[in-house]
């Protein structure tokens, strides 16, 4: 968990600016589960940020107290077990599109 910093909210559309109490920057599923458990236990309002490309104020709403930032989870890979491509939640769509073109 980190305190609110400018780094945590680098966005494509800086229309809304939130000031959450804390931001959890996660790298894997286990960290996401731990962060959700901690926020739910605290009773605070939670929002999840992925690639930061949304122009709505869902994450940056003033009522949001804790944010889970999935921006570090941005891999694109082929999952042989599922025989499918996987695009993690933090991957920006424009970056993904450019990579495949």
Image (cartoon, rainbow, N blue to C red):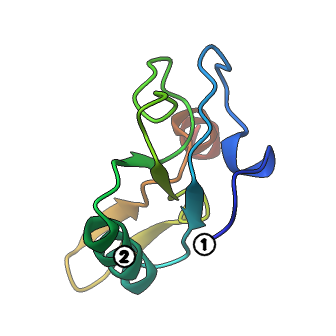
Q: Are marks 1 and 2 in contact (CB under 8 Å)?
A: yes
Residue 72 in picture, x, y percent from top left: 61, 64
Farthest residue to the right: give it. Answer: 6
In this view, the residue farthest toward the top is 15
Which residue lies at the image location 52% right of the left edge and 31% below the top edge?
Answer: 60
Dot 1: element: loop
Q: Could you say which disc has been placed on residue 38 in the image?
A: 2
Please report the residue visible at 70 percent of the width from the left and 60 percent of the height from the top: 3
Name which residue lies at 62% across and 38% down: 19
The numbered dot on residue 40 is none
Which residue is nearer to you in this view: 27 or 47? 47
Q: Which picture quadrant has residue 23?
A: bottom right
Question: What residue lies at 60% left-to-right and 72% top-to-bottom?
Answer: 1
Q: Which residue lies under the disc numbered 1?
A: 1
Question: Which residue in the rendered view is the most extreme toward the left?
Answer: 82
- Sequence-wise, the earlier of marks 1 and 2 is 1
* Circle 1 crowding by C-alpha within 10 Å: few under 14, some 14–19, many from 20: few
What is the quadrant of the C terminus in the image?
A: top right
């Amino acid at each position: 968990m980190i305190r609110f910093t400018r780094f945590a909210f680098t966005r494509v559309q800086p229309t809304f600016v939130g000031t959450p109490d804390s931001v959890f920057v996660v790298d894997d599923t286990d960290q996401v589960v731990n962060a959700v458990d901690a926020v739910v236990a605290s009773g605070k309002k939670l929002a999840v940020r992925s690639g930061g490309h949304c122009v709505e104020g869902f994450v940056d709403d003033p009522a949001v107290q804790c944010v889970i930032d999935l921006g570090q989870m941005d891999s694109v890979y082929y999952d042989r077990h599922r025989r499918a491509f996987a695009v993690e939640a933090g991957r920006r769509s424009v970056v993904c599109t450019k990579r495949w073109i």
